[in-house]
Amino acid sequence: MTTKSFHPPQRTLMGPGPSDVNPRILEAMSRPTIGHLDPVFVAMMDEMKELLKYAFQTKNELTMPVSAPGSAGMETCFVNLVEPGDKVIVCQNGVFGGRMKENVERCGGTAVMVEDDWGKAVDPNKLEETLKSNPDAKIVAFVHAETSTGAQSDAKTLVEIAHQHDCLTIVDAVTSLGGTPVRVDEWHIDAIYSGTQKCLSCTPGLSPVSFSERALEKVRNRPSKVQSWFLDLNLVMGYWGGEGKRAYHHTAPINALYGLHEALVILKEEGLENAWARHTKHHQALRAGLEAMGLNFVVHEEERLPQLNAVTIPEGVDDAAVRATLLNDYSLEIGAGLGAMAGKVWRIGLMGHACNARNVYLCLNALDDVLGRMKAPVERGVEVAAAQRVLAG
Ligand SMILES: *Cc1c(COP(=O)(O)O)cnc(C)c1O
């Protein structure tokens, strides 16, 4: 056997991430690699911080990409802010809240869980009650956009309640950033992390984070060392902090950062509000089509994310066979259920560059064909017209 170059097929990615990468981003990533302390590169980093501040709607000085995927952004928030013995309230309404609990415990903290049903938003009243019975809590953590179910929580209200009880807040915005409003300063979020491969439509592997001055104060003044050397912001700031002057911490993923820079330029060109509106519009079209087929959404309308559409798999339909056929016959990827929802739902992403009319129609036509061939109990031949009505209106 001769070893050859790897050429992946061209797919349409309509799952929970990664989403389709804009070709402009891939082209940007193929530009010449330069040194990570090259003045030209450093100037690009400064510009990237400004672009990220725009994406997060913040003036936070410490706004930068962590050199690893969304999960590392999560860890960056927890390892820096949770000290051994700290009590942290973690709101869980899906898979990712469970990972927050893991993070707290590995930092030597105690996690107090606020549990909500999967598919529902976090209940602010439950958070309030939990804070009242845990006056020694230091931090409240929650997922803004729960990708495992497609539910969106009211970040502004949850942060307000946390602050009334003197807690800092950690917010997961991996799936929300770029697809649905995230307003770090207006909502007074203390620490937030996101990912590049969801609504920013960049390649996976970077995690934008932003820390408020108040959160940074805790990081700077903690008596114990941050247990992760790589993610310790006190050290990372030597490279990313301030303007211009940079000290070596780790070799930045140069070309990946070109990609994120391009992704953020694209977002700026479109405008945040326009990007949010585009996600809402195409979600409404996809929804009309899916519902015309008789498929039901997992999440109640008011709490639904436009970029992640979770629908219940009809009775008797072979989940894996449907997804495999979509992949083989249409080169289309949709997401399987995760955790407690495995085998029960499909998660159809409309994220970033993949959020467009062509993909709405592609997905509806493909589902019509594949579900029809499998004799699934769905209405056929009606979904495209239903989507069309929304997009035309
Ligand atoms: C995807 C995702 C993550 C993890 O991001 P990775 O880039 O896969 O590490 C964390 N939280 C949420 C809500 C996500 O959707």
Image (spheres, grey):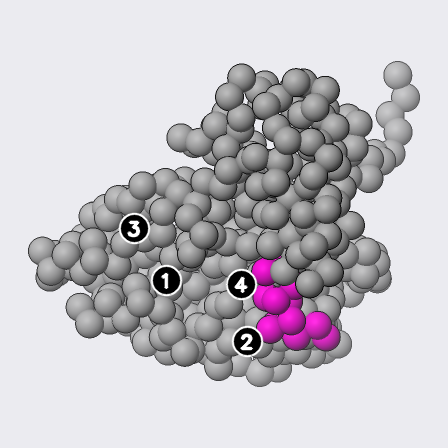
Alpha carbon separation for disc pair 2 and 3? 26 Å
Quadrant where the N terminus is found in the figure: top right
Mark 1 near ligand 1 (CB under 8 Å)? Answer: no
Judged from the image, the secondary structure of the residue bearing numbered disc 1 is: loop
- Determine the residue positioned at 59% across, 60% down: 280
Q: Residues within 10 Å of mark 4 (few under 14, many from 20)?
A: many
Using the image, determine if residue 203 lies above or below residue 265.
above
Q: Secondary structure at mark 4?
A: loop
Residue 140 image point, x, y percent: 27, 59
Residue underneath mark 4: 180
Kindly report the distance in space between the C-alpha atoms of the residues bearing marks 1 and 4.
Answer: 12 Å
Q: Secondary structure at mark 2?
A: helix
Q: Say few, some or many: other residues with alpha carbon within 10 Å of mark 1 (under 14 / 14 to 19 / 20 or more).
A: some
> Closest to the observer: 34 or 62?
62
Q: Residue at (53%, 28%) from the top-left corner?
A: 313
Mark 3–mark 4 CB contact (< 8 Å): no
Q: CA distance from mark 3 to mark 1?
A: 12 Å
Looking at the image, which residue is at 76% across and 42% down? 362
Which kind of residue does numbered mark 1 sit on? Asp
| Residues in magenta, as a range | 269-280
Label 1 to label 2: alpha-carbon separation? 21 Å
N-terminal of the two: label 1 or label 4? Answer: 1
Q: What residue did someone put label 3 on?
A: 91
Q: Which mark is residue 53?
A: 2
Residue underneath mark 1 = 154
